[in-house]
Amino acid sequence: MAYVAVKGGERAIEAAHAWLAEERRGDPMLPELTVPQIAQQLGLAVDRVMAEGACHDRGLAALAIKQARGDLIEAAFLLRAYRTTLPRFGASLPLDTGAMRIRRRISATYKDLPGGQVLGPTFDYTHRLLDFALAAEGEPPPPAPEAPAGDATMPRVTGILAREGLMASEAPGEAEPPDLTREPLACPADRPLRLQALARGDEGFLLALGYSTQRGYGNAHPFVGEIRLGEVAVEIEPPELGFPIEIGEITVTECQMVNQFAGSRTEPPQFTRGYGLVFGHGERKAMAMALVDRALRARELGEEATAPAQSEEFVLYHCDNVEATGFVEHLKLPHYVDFQSELEKIRQMRATALREAAE
Amino acid sequence: MSATQTRSAEGAAAAGGEHRSRGPAGPDAGYNFGYLDENTKRMIRRALLKAVAIPGHQVPFGSREMPLPYGWGTGGIQVTAAVIGPDDTLKVIDQGADDTTNAVSIRRFFARVTGVETTERTAEATIIQTRHRIPETPLHEGQVLVYQVPMPEPLFRLEPSVTETRRMHALADYSLMHVKLYEDIVRHGHIATSYNYPVMVNGRYLMSPSPIPAFDNPKMHRMPALQLFGAGREKRIYAVPPWTEVRSLDFEDHPFEPVRADAACALCGSRESYLDEVVTDDRGGRMFVCSDTDYCHTRQARREAAE
C-alpha cells in the first residue's frame, strides 16, 4: 500500500544521515579539508560562527563549519548546542578594550588622533576583482611589511569627547550582568541584556535593521567614532582570591558610534553612544550592532520610538538566528493532523457559503 | 555535572550528526542521565512545580539549546528530560504516530541519553511526549503527557507584544479572543479555528493546547494524567494538573464542535478516532486512516484475534 511509504522513519533517517556524510565529504579523490585549514584560511567564517554561536573557541568553530558543510548558521547551532552543556563559572571582569593590542583602529570623526589611524587587515580599499591567481594553488604571499612597533597608547575616541563633556556618560553597572543563556529574555530589557542579545544576534538581521535606521526608519545620525580590532585580556576575580587574574586573551572587534542627541529637559545637547562588540574580526556585525543598540535607546533618551529597529521586542525576539532558523524550518515537519482539521473546516465553510449563495 | 566537564569535542560533534543506530543498551556514558545537567533539571522542575500550582499560567524558564533544532520539540524534550527517571517507560508520538521521523529521532535521543525502556503502547507508557495529538486511548492516573509547544501564547495572532499579552493574562482580559471568535461566526457562520483551539483552564487562564486538532480538546478536560507543556524557543512552561477543568471557548448559541473527517478508518474501521486523509492517486482517490497508530494497530490485532 502506498500509505506505508510515508512511515518507516527509522531506516529513512539512517540512510539520510549516511548520504549526508557522503555529501559532506564530496569527491574522495580530492584531499579532505582539515580543521586547522578552516581555522586558518576561512578565519572570518570561524569568527562569525564564534560570535553567533556565543562561544570563543576557534578549533570547535572550525570543526562545526566542517561538519555543517559550510552552512554558518548550522555551524553556530552546533557550537551553541555544545556550549550549553558546559558549566558556568561566573562572569569575567569588563574587558578593557582601551588596553587592546591593536591590529586595526580607525576613526571617521578625526583625521588624526593620538595613536593614529591603523588600517590593518581590511577589505576596505581592495578592488573587488576576482583574483584568478588564487584559483591556482601557488606560493604563499610575501610577508607584509611591518612598521616598527610604536609605543603610542591608543585612547578611545569616545573618551576624548567625554573629557570635553560632549559625550553622554554611561551609567556604571555594579551588578553582574544578566545571562540570557540561563534566564529567559524579559522585556523591558536593560542595556546589558540587549547588548548580550545583539552580540549573539544574526549578522544579516542586524545589518538590515541598522541599514533601516540610516534610511529613515528611526532617527539616526551616526558617525563611526572608532572601530578597533585586536587582542584583549580576559580577567576574572575569584571571590576566594579577591584580586583579578588573567585567564586568557581573545580577539574582539569593537565599534563605538557617536550619535547626535538634541538634549532633553534634564540633559544638555550632547553625543550619545551606540555600542557594538563581537568576537573575532566582525566589523560589519559590530557596526550594525552599534546602530541597533543606539536605536534601542530611543525610549531611555525620550525619543519617539516608531521604527522596527527601535522596538525592543521586535529586535530582541527575532535577532537570534538559531531560534529563527529552527522555527522557520520546523514548517517542513509533518503537519498533516492540523492540515486535516483545516481541510475539514474549509470544506464545512465552503459548503455553508455555497448553500447561502444558492439560496 | 562531571560527565559534561570531561567530554571531548568529538563527543559534542557526534551529538549533532550521529548516523549510527541506537547505541549499546544503557545510557551514553558521555552524558548526564537525560542529557541535561542536574542543575538545569532542577531549574526546569521548579518551573514545572510553579506551572502545576497555577494551571494554565505560562512560566518563563531558562530554556537551553538542545542538540535538536528549535521547533523540533526542544521544549517537550527538556520537560521530559527533567521528569524522566530510570524506571520510566517512554512513548513518543508525532501526528499521533510512533514511526514518524521526528518521533523516531526523539525516541532514539532518549534511548541514547537515558537508556530507559521505550514503547509504542499508550497504556504501557509512563511518559508520553507528543506533538500535535492526544492519544485516542484514555490516559490513566500516574501517566504524564508532555506536549511540544511552538507558540505558548494563545493571543499572539491578535497581539504580538509579549509585554501586552502578559498584562492581559494578569487581568484575565480575554475580550480580544472572544471578539475574534465572534467575528468568525459573523463572517463564516462557524468558528474558523480547527486546531490550536484556545481553552480556558480552571476558569482562569486562557491557554494554547498546542496545535492539536480541536477534536482532541475535550480529552484535556478532567484528564486523569498530568499534562505538561514545554515551549523551548519561547522559553515557557505550563501545565494542567490531573482532573482540572479545561473548556474550549465557545458561545451558548454556538457551542464548541470538534471536527473529524466523516469516514471510517480504512485499516481498523474506527468511526471514533481522528483520521488522516491519504491521497492514493492523482485522480481524487483518497483513503482515511487513524492518525493514532497504536490505537489502530491494537484494534486491527483485536479484530484478527476475533476472526
Image (spheres, rainbow, N blue to C red):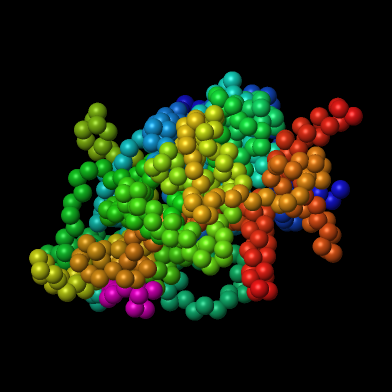
- Give the quarter of the image for residue A120: bottom left
Q: Is residue A13 magenta?
A: no
Judging depth in this view, the residue of A264 and A334 nearest the camera is A334
A19 on left or right of B165:
right
> Is A279 above or below relative to B141?
below
Judging depth in this view, the residue of A1 and A263 nearest the camera is A1
A294 on left or right of B260:
left
> Is A322 above or below relative to A228?
above
Residue pictured at 39% horizontal, 73% vertical: A211
Q: Position of residue B241 (x, y in %)?
A: 47, 32
- Per the rendered image, the range of residues in magenta is A212-226
Residue pictured at 61% horizontal, 49% vertical: B258
A236 on left or right of B243:
left
- Give the quarter of the image for residue B165: bottom left
Q: Position of residue A264 (x, y in %)?
A: 13, 70
Q: Can see residue A52?
A: no
Residue pictured at 86% horizontal, 48% vertical: A1
| Outermost residue toward the top in this view | B87
Q: Position of residue A50 (x, y in %)?
A: 46, 52
Residue pictured at 38% horizontal, 56% vertical: B175
Q: Is residue A214 magenta?
A: yes
Q: Can see residue A345?
A: yes
> Is A76 above or below relative to B272?
below
